[in-house]
Amino acid sequence: MKERIEMKYTQGFYPIIGKENLSRDIFSLTICCHEISSLAVPGQFVHIALPGHSLRRPISISSIDREAHTIRIIFAVKGTGTKDLSCLNVGNTIDIVGPLGNGFTLLGKDKKVILIGGGIGTPPMAAMASYYGENAHVISGFRDKTMVILQDEFKRYTPNTYVCTEDGSEGIKGFVTMPLEELLKKEHFDMVYACGPIPMLKAVAQVTERYDTPCEVSMEQHMGCGIGACLVCTCKIKTEHGIDFRHVCKNGPVFDAREVEWNG
Amino acid sequence: MKERIEMKYTQGFYPIIGKENLSRDIFSLTICCHEISSLAVPGQFVHIALPGHSLRRPISISSIDREAHTIRIIFAVKGTGTKDLSCLNVGNTIDIVGPLGNGFTLLGKDKKVILIGGGIGTPPMAAMASYYGENAHVISGFRDKTMVILQDEFKRYTPNTYVCTEDGSEGIKGFVTMPLEELLKKEHFDMVYACGPIPMLKAVAQVTERYDTPCEVSMEQHMGCGIGACLVCTCKIKTEHGIDFRHVCKNGPVFDAREVEWNG
Amino acid sequence: MADLNVNILGHDFKNPVIMSSGVFGYGREYEEFFPLEALGGMATKGTTLHKRNGSEGKRITETPSGLLFSVGLQNPGIDYYIENELPNLLTKNTNILTNVAASDKEEYLQIIDKLEQTDAPIIELNISCPNLSGEPYGVSCSSTEMITRAVRERTKKPLTVKLSPNVGNIGEIAKAAEAGGADAVSLINAISGMKIDINTRRPFLRNNHGGFSGAAIFPIALRMVWEAANAVDIPVLGIGGISSSEDALQMIMAGASCVEVGCAIFKDPYAPIKIINEIDQWCDDHGVKDINELIGAVEPW
Amino acid sequence: MADLNVNILGHDFKNPVIMSSGVFGYGREYEEFFPLEALGGMATKGTTLHKRNGSEGKRITETPSGLLFSVGLQNPGIDYYIENELPNLLTKNTNILTNVAASDKEEYLQIIDKLEQTDAPIIELNISCPNLSGEPYGVSCSSTEMITRAVRERTKKPLTVKLSPNVGNIGEIAKAAEAGGADAVSLINAISGMKIDINTRRPFLRNNHGGFSGAAIFPIALRMVWEAANAVDIPVLGIGGISSSEDALQMIMAGASCVEVGCAIFKDPYAPIKIINEIDQWCDDHGVKDINELIGAVEPW
Ligand SMILES: Cc1cc2nc3c(=O)[nH]c(=O)nc-3n(C[C@H](O)[C@H](O)[C@H](O)COP(=O)(O)OP(=O)(O)OC[C@H]3O[C@@H](n4cnc5c(N)ncnc54)[C@H](O)[C@@H]3O)c2cc1C
Ligand SMILES: Cc1cc2nc3c(=O)[nH]c(=O)nc-3n(C[C@H](O)[C@H](O)[C@H](O)COP(=O)(O)OP(=O)(O)OC[C@H]3O[C@@H](n4cnc5c(N)ncnc54)[C@H](O)[C@@H]3O)c2cc1C
Ligand SMILES: Cc1cc2nc3c(=O)[nH]c(=O)nc-3n(C[C@H](O)[C@H](O)[C@H](O)COP(=O)(O)O)c2cc1C
Ligand SMILES: Cc1cc2nc3c(=O)[nH]c(=O)nc-3n(C[C@H](O)[C@H](O)[C@H](O)COP(=O)(O)O)c2cc1C
Ligand code: FES
Ligand code: FES
């Protein structure tokens, strides 16, 4: 399509040049894709088509390498779509639309921030850690130590990393809000960024509100178009006029935690 | 399933151990499958399931190697199913039910027979040629020389091979009925076996009837169950009581040419 | 091992999985894959008064996640069935649903009268064949009730009526069957669908349209089963696009007492067996002791 | 280059491919993939009198070769549309079908009265939304005719009525719309379907059932378009599961003057553009000089 060059969104088939199995059922794919790598910012996502599936699958961009023209995605096998995705290998091409959505608000690199990832919500924090470097404190939460991912990478960017596991099999026993609260108690932070399951995001939102610290959360919702046309991917947002139904794909996936209506 | 051992039909996932691209869009797969190779006879078929397709695809068994426990199938890419089939490679497994249907009637190996294959109907004649050896006269018809397959193999079994192409680009210019009629004029044959498009089968049936030579034809029809339960794969057969609707999968695919109702 | 037994239509079904009519002939072919006694039951090929040769031309084609067919009820006729197939089936230690089809009331009653003389345990009255000429009885409430009642008056056998999905009010239709005296309803039959060969500009099937079945139709079938189950007090046999234990469990939660597996068996000849085993496994994994707990267990919003 | 122009609803459609309502918003998003003028036309999101937030909970899920959704008609309301979206759309050099939805006649008429003041060129009257509470007008002939006539009396604009597939007599319904004064009928809307989460024992959608769309439903849609086209003299816009030029051509041969492409665009954002190009190519390859030759060209058996 000759028009594509001037258009905002890109759809294409891009080669997979790297694949890793990070832990049981968690995979990383590195995709060579200049159009997306040159535009993408942390917190955005790609929408992936898989043969035999009528809906694309949204997956966050976990890191962006503008020099190598690559992006990396990290995903967990949940159902049939991510299962099929995990069967793609180096040398295969992948059908992607992206970059989609709004990324996290990036402050000056000298600002002090906390990055919180829960489970398969940790990957987008890799790009954030690479941006903020040692000014980032990275808290990751997992069910148990077999699920822990990305810690070596975080440690390359910053000395300040914290792992929590629900069963205490690695790092702190408990939830990400424990180190979060301790950090906020001790120091001033300019922003907290969080991605993970809703209960975690809600807890993080409550803590940051208590400490009056700005917080951005990345939300999930089942999607159709991925670009704001079909209105299926709602997120309830508090506005002056009451609750409004916004859309994760176009208005998000990143929202200001204070604006999200967490009850429902 | 422990019951499977005593059952007549087998369904299983079998490894592909050989793949060849015989000509444009024509592929051969060698499948390791003791259960099928030990039972199959020439003219039978296998029913192949492919992911994303609700119906299996019937493909003739082209050759059977009981020692190696393999069967070979040869198919043309026609639509989406055979396209997907052509994407399977050595090392993949293939989901097969078989062997299905009734094979050709095998006479004594000393009998003189004519084997006729038209286009993608030639493959089953490979197993027949291997059986009858030099007592077989093999006539193959193709649209043009780019479509010609299996001639080297036929020549290994018998010196009597004839190729016809519609455009004369290889062998005899014209239809398989030309060499057929010449052979029948010259000599007595105990049986003619034919597989190929309906118009060819019908022409062969007329010629053999004229020369009062027994003839068996392998018929095609769209299939559901492949074993005679769903009654979708009809072939009209002349009986004493008039026309009866028999089923290609269970009563065929091989029928006595004189019994087939060719008009309709 | 959960208890998978369901008692409906006056019989114990050792598990809730029945093979659906038309894909399974009279049981002789798939019996070469597994013993029929593994099944909760099986419905026979739709059988008519007289032998029928069925439709001309191609009878089946694939669609995305489904298939379109028109067999035109090829079958050897009720006398042949009674003489040659039924006795064999009665030895199989599973519940046999004799699926009966006709194009008018007289024919239905003649078939029923013949069956009444036999040990055929259950009748499944097919009033919904999408491939017969003329409107099937199943497309209106009044004709559904009328034909059900007419048959009911002639037979003491347990009677399930197989409904047509080509209606706008499946709940009302189910009620009409109930009012007519049905002991259960079976639904859905195949949906009326079409395919055109754009090169020949001809409908693919000689009947122009045909029956549309398979995984593709499951969401419609489930919704209809749910509507029917909410409308009637008699048991519902859930049919349409079931190809996994998850599908079967959805149907049961929607209100089906048993499910019928249809064309999924074309893809996987062991489909019904796997579904039975997986239902059993799922019940164990989820602390369900008795499958009957799950019937209609869905909690609507 | 065949002539792909079709003149219906008083307008030239430069090709017979229209984007279907609801998957395409008000055109702003997919315009980032291709210019809207490439399309024969586009139908807007179903727009109601007042702003609606739409359904709670999850709104979409995948099914084999299809999807199930319940948006509950989220939209900003007709005033916002007239002020902020319509003027923009009118600059796009394609035919805009304003898709209008309401739950009662008064609301429909108020919307129509407002649109009558504008340059909105064509109205697509949605009487078939599967996700509103209450029965849509489209499920009976009398209410279809009534609402069509009521709207007809209030507008001079070309009017196509979007029919519900959840009926047993789509031909009759199409006739009722024609009798009520429709200039065309659009069909089918999504089919009512259901999915149950067996772990929570809850329907996946808050509305319990939802709209079922996608390639899975194509055989049903095609059959209904064929029945409707045979029943009426007004043009038919064929909708439902179209994801390839072959599907579009089947619809056209079945009698559709134009086709609407719906959720296929979720999978491939260029789907409508590819379909247009491939129809053109197919016509060239098959010696079809004018697409109008193909409308209703199927030859039934
Ligand atoms: C903006 C965004 C970013 C995401 N980033 C990641 C990521 O980086 N890594 C990762 O592993 N997962 C991520 N997810 C979740 C991921 O999209 C789902 O796990 C995936 O779609 C499940 O597909 P499936 O076919 O395996 O599951 P199935 O349950 O079979 O999917 C059925 C349908 O539900 C949808 N669905 C199921 N779960 C979710 C979910 N949690 N969110 C949205 N749709 C869902 C699927 O897309 C599909 O349409 C993200 C989701 C969103 C919305
Ligand atoms: C007994 C038998 C033996 C056969 N042996 C061979 C063989 O050895 N090599 C070979 O290349 N082909 C063979 N065929 C034909 C082969 O089955 C079809 O070419 C194949 O099914 C086409 O599938 P598709 O998905 O590519 O085409 P599509 O047109 O996409 O298929 C759509 C549907 O139509 C069915 N179908 C289409 N064409 C045929 C056909 N000619 N016969 C039966 N069903 C059809 C398909 O199975 C499928 O269900 C045989 C057919 C039969 C009945
Ligand atoms: C090839 C075929 C033949 C069928 N014949 C009959 C029949 O004779 N009587 C009947 O009641 N249903 C018949 N059906 C319908 C099935 O019993 C079932 O209701 C329908 O296919 C939907 O279920 P499924 O999607 O699981 O196949 C037939 C279905 C197929 C595919
Ligand atoms: C997410 C979604 C929203 C829809 N919203 C509307 C709508 O507002 N008004 C309407 O008339 N149809 C609506 N539809 C129905 C489509 O326009 C179309 O009729 C239906 O999806 C069948 O076509 P398809 O299978 O090509 O998608 C919607 C469909 C989808 C998938
Ligand atoms: S997925 Fe379509 S609006 Fe978000
Ligand atoms: S395919 Fe079922 S009877 Fe032949």
Image: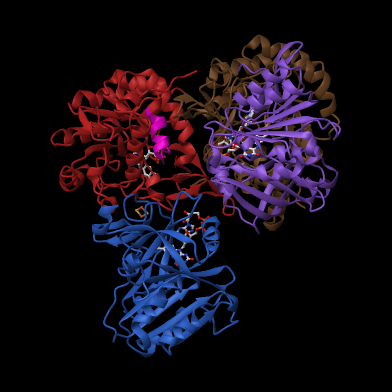
Chain colours: A purple, B blue, C red, D brown
- Indicate the quadrant containing the C terminus of chain A: top left, top right, bottom left or bottom right: top right
Q: Depth check: give the residue in front, B237 or A199.
A: A199
C164 is higher (above) or lower (below) than D74:
below
Residue ID at (45%, 83%) = B154
Residue A109 makes an appearance in the image = yes
- Count of number-bearing discs: 0
What secondary structure characterizes most of the magenta part? helix
Q: Position of residue C113 (x, y in %)?
A: 17, 33
Visible residue check, residue C164: no
D82 relative to C248 in the view: left or right: right
**Quarter occupied by residue A75:** top right
Above-or-below relation of B42 to C20:
below
Q: Position of residue B192 (x, y in %)?
A: 36, 78
Q: Quadrant of residue D261?
A: top right
Q: Position of residue B117 (x, y in %)?
A: 45, 75
Residue sitting at the far front: A186
- Residue placed at 44% from the left, 50% from the top? C60
Depth order, front residue of B185/C228: C228
**Residue C265 vs residue B89: left or right?**
left
- Which quadrant of the render holds ligand 5? top right
Q: Nearer the viewer, residue B248 or B59?
A: B59
User: Looking at the image, is A1 positioned above or below residue A131?
Assistant: below
Q: Which residues are magenta?
A: C240-252
- Is residue D196 found inside the magenta-colored segment of the image? no
In the image as oriented, which residue stretches furthest toward the top? Answer: D106
Of residues C296 and D250, the one nearer the viewer is: C296
Q: Is residue C218 left or right of residue A181?
A: left
Q: Position of residue A253 (x, y in %)?
A: 71, 30
- Compared across the picture, whether A31 is left or right of B20 comes to right
| Residue shown at 27% from the left, 79% from the top | B107
